[in-house]
Image (cartoon, coloured by chain):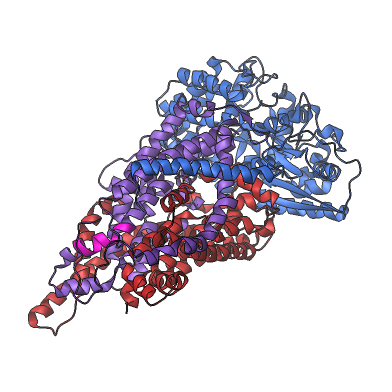
Chain colours: A red, B blue, C purple
Amino acid sequence: MTELTAPTLPDEGTRLGARISHAAGQLPPPSARQLRARRRAALMGLLRHALLIGFGLIMLYPLLWMLASSIKPSALIFREPGLIPTEIDMSNYTDGWTALLHPFSTYLLNSGLVVLGSVIGNLVACSMAAYAFARLEFRGRNLWFAIMLMSIMLPIHVVIVPQYVLFSSLQWINTFLPLIVPKLLATDAFFIFLMVQFFRGIPKELDEAARLDGCGHVRIYWRIMLPLALPALATTAIFTFIWTWNDFFSQLIFLTRPDMYTVPVALAAFKDSTGETSWGSLFAMSIVSLIPVFLVFLFGQKYLVKGIATTGIK
Amino acid sequence: MRFTTTRARRAAATAGATVAVLALAACAGGDSGLSPAGEDTAAPPAEECPCEIRFSWWGSDSRHAATQEIIDAFEAENPDITVVPDFTDWSGYWDKLATSVAASDAPDVMTQEERYISDYASRGVLADLSALEIDTSKVDAAILAGGQTADGQFGIPTGVNAYAVVIDPEIFAAAGVEVPDDETWTWDDYVEIANEISAKAPEGVYGAQDYGFNEAGINVMARQRGESLYTADGKVGVSKETVTDFFQVSLDLQAGGGEPDAARTMEIQDAGPEGSLLGTNTGAMGVWWSNQLGALSKASGRELQLLRLPGESEGERTGMYLKPAMFYSISSKSEYPQASAKFVDFLLNSPAAAEIMLTDRGLPANTEVREGILDKLDAPNALVADFMAEIAPTIVDSPPVPPNGSGDVADITERLNAEVLFGRLTPEKAAEQFLSELEAAIG
Amino acid sequence: MSTTDIPRRADAPARRTRGRTGATRRGDGRAAIIFLAPWFAGLVLITAGPMAASLYLSFTDYDLLTPPTWIGPENYTRMFEDPRFLNALQVTFTYVLVSVPIQLALSLALALILDKGLRALSFYRSIYYLPSLLGGSVAVAILWRQVFGADGLLNQFLALFGIQGEGWVSHPDYALGTLIVLNVWTFGSPMVIFLAGLRQIPQMYYEAASIDGASKVRQFITITVPLLSPIVFFNLVLQVIGSFQSFTQAYVVSGGTGGPADSTMFYTLYLYLKGFGSLDMGYASAMAWFLLLIIGGMTAVNFVASKYWVFYDD
């Protein structure tokens, strides 16, 4: 499927891109020729939508399949792997919700808390660090920047044991602290770098002008950089949400009591590669856990595109 | 923010040094360090309870629910002991356990498996259970030996499984092939029957699922020839010929059409019981652990049956054995070894616990409680119980505890089997590599 | 600096002259301390210790269960005699070199299409992001067999043309290819970052160019390309770092084995299996630090090369 459509895309992309920016131009009163052109444009628009929808179906297929599997009787998931279920059985949802000692809402809530702390932490701490790296001149800036990047180059699997020792000595195991405090301290260099790149894209004339007006760095950061880098902040918030929501390994290691488990840890507990796996419940609860992230993306993405382009610069 | 090469290099070097210095400072203060298994401190003679112990296991939701029920029953009997559950899936379990042991933070009571118990026992992680008050008199001595090393009893078997052939009689019937007599069939018979079923059954239905990914098959074949995968003193005890023959069976099945092609085989292998040939009604035979019959039957919706592995009367002795499904172990660092022992004793000997657990952790190792639950088993598990009772008299001995490093054997077997099936290694070459890699792993 | 000139209107702020006044520079050091404080605290308290510990462990024999013993550089020399390690290195390099360019090109093309000028854009954006939401869900493993298995969708489709396909996902010659497709399929994150970057470009530049009579294509080349280049650079650097550490997809799809026959044995997966499976954390740590050298080197190259194509407005 993917093989089939992929080759046509890049080519289509550039043409569409050009046409879209054309369509965004101003609209003078229509003439007969323009009307014809507009009809042709409408037709092309339709074609474009058809292509986008076709491509979208490929994107959607996994989710549809998971949804279909979640409403099948468990035994049929592998025997009849097609998209249309022959039998509908909603018990995967009711069973899955209560299958793991605590109702699934406990895990959703735990994940929610971890995510909330992480989002706030990344937004505040990473944007502060990014401001320093993007706009301030201080000694050893490149060195510190390199150190920051280096910190995301080591696979988690070799630092998790020392981390566990560290957090264990702080009595933080089985709390959310090992998952949230690092975010409050800007250890996620990905987002620092992201915001550095966005901050550097903001015309420097703006903060220079502000500085001439007597603004300090705090005000420039707060009143100019943050509002203008809204897309970057939205990206950070959304990605932090999604990645934390899906993060399995550190949550598995640092949380030891079932009442503290988060969604990914709970989902893993449906699976037993040596014995019986409750695939039906697993898929049903996977769908349930996808709803919050999908909603966050759906509503959050409008802030992604609220850049300078829409807020305007005075 | 631009780097010249030299600046970047210098930056990286300085960064490394800085981090090291910072970290040394950070680490020096911590007393928990990276040294879990220091000197053994003797357990305090009297424990202060009410106390809280942690019990960790792997599995899926049905086991979690059943285990919690058992914990509740235990706590009702022992109101001063609280048991905190700690569960996850198989691979996450081992990551978590190793990490917590590294930080001297291991659960008090843990579940172990034969591939790892020697690693944990020999490194002082596990307590010698014979020194604790756990009644093991109802457990068969040969089974109990599965949790012993020269230094003590480090695990108590939860129950037993046997490696056996699971068949789907409906597919045999549909193909018009007779179910063989499992007391006399040979490995050649197995290949022949599988090939015949594939030929006669409808398109897409096969005689057998490949068995080459599991080292248990090598062990059984070795034992039939008077060898053993591992020797009692922790060496490799299987000959190159045996391993060669083991891989050859797969190759013969593939050539004769008795099993799916290599790529399909790999796919099916990764799909667990639910996606297996038997689970999807597309194969007549498969080699599985007996405790997987329940999952297979449920997935297939059919009445599957158990047969002995081929070759039991072909060689110089029988090769099948009872494998401890898992072990209950206690951390040598537990603050409450006596409470932990009490809990293990309950898991092992309480009829109430057995009635809840049934055969989820293997057919109970305690023969007395096993008798008590026989009439409560569902059809597939009743079949397992009968089958085990039937083969028990023919079993010669239990294989020795796999040595340190044997956790790698699963990976080695699966990888080399794939190399053979895809025609990248001959069975002889694969056998050579198997022996050298396994020796390196356990050496 | 870039040679590309940005068309601007006469009343746009005059281009800043290079160099700064002494007055602005003086305050930066103090401000930097404030803005970097959380990040620095995180570096010292959380990041540095475990990183240094893993560096130390890379020179030891460490089985996690007993204290490490110093063995010098043996782990590092061992690596180059380990055929499975060399294979993992090769697999990973192939993966990075193929999938990073494809994914970047696709995500940039789609970001341009989905930027503006089309109805229901937010809907498409959400749909296209969906695969990235699934993350490392076990459902992906089953799904990938559904699509690329011997009897999967792709082969059913090929059969329509009389082509007999392979069992792509589990054939040693093709399994890596399906993982590359899987990675490309989750192009949502770079796409979102591109989208945010596009919105960061001040609209006034385009308006100015239109008035000057620049064609859309010319606007794309002279405005969009240079102003988006920091974001392209960011995506490139982070995709390279991330792809070298790629773990979850191979872990999930191969059932944690890197199979069939080590054909999807990514570097990080091998490191993980060595560390936690074979309890050889010393060796795993050495591999991790060697990986850091590789990634660090690639990143440095990227930074040096960026001089010639990345445009910053400062």
Q: Quadrant of the N terminus of chain C?
A: bottom left
Whether residue A121 is visible, yes or no, is yes
Which residue occupies the foreground of this view, A275 or B419?
B419
Which residue occupies the foreground of this view, A286 or B354?
A286
Which residue occupies the foreground of this view, B175 or C87?
C87
Q: Quadrant of residue C276?
A: top right
Residue situated furthest right in the rendering: B46
Q: Is residue C24 above or below residue C134?
A: below
In the picture, measured across the screen, residue A167 lies left or right of residue A287, that is: right
In the picture, measured across the screen, residue B264 lies left or right of residue A29, that is: right
Q: Quadrant of the C terminus of chain C?
A: bottom left
Coordinates of residue A110 in the picture (x, y in percent): 62, 63
Whether residue A1 is visible, yes or no, is no
Inspect the magenta stretch and tell me whether residue C229 lies in it. yes
Inspect the magenta stretch and tell me whether residue C110 lies in it. no
Coordinates of residue B149 in the picture (x, y in percent): 75, 26
Residue situated furthest bottom in the rendering: A29
Magenta highlight: main SS: helix
Q: Quadrant of residue B362?
A: top right
Residue situated furthest front in the rendering: C22
Residue segment shown in magenta? C221-230
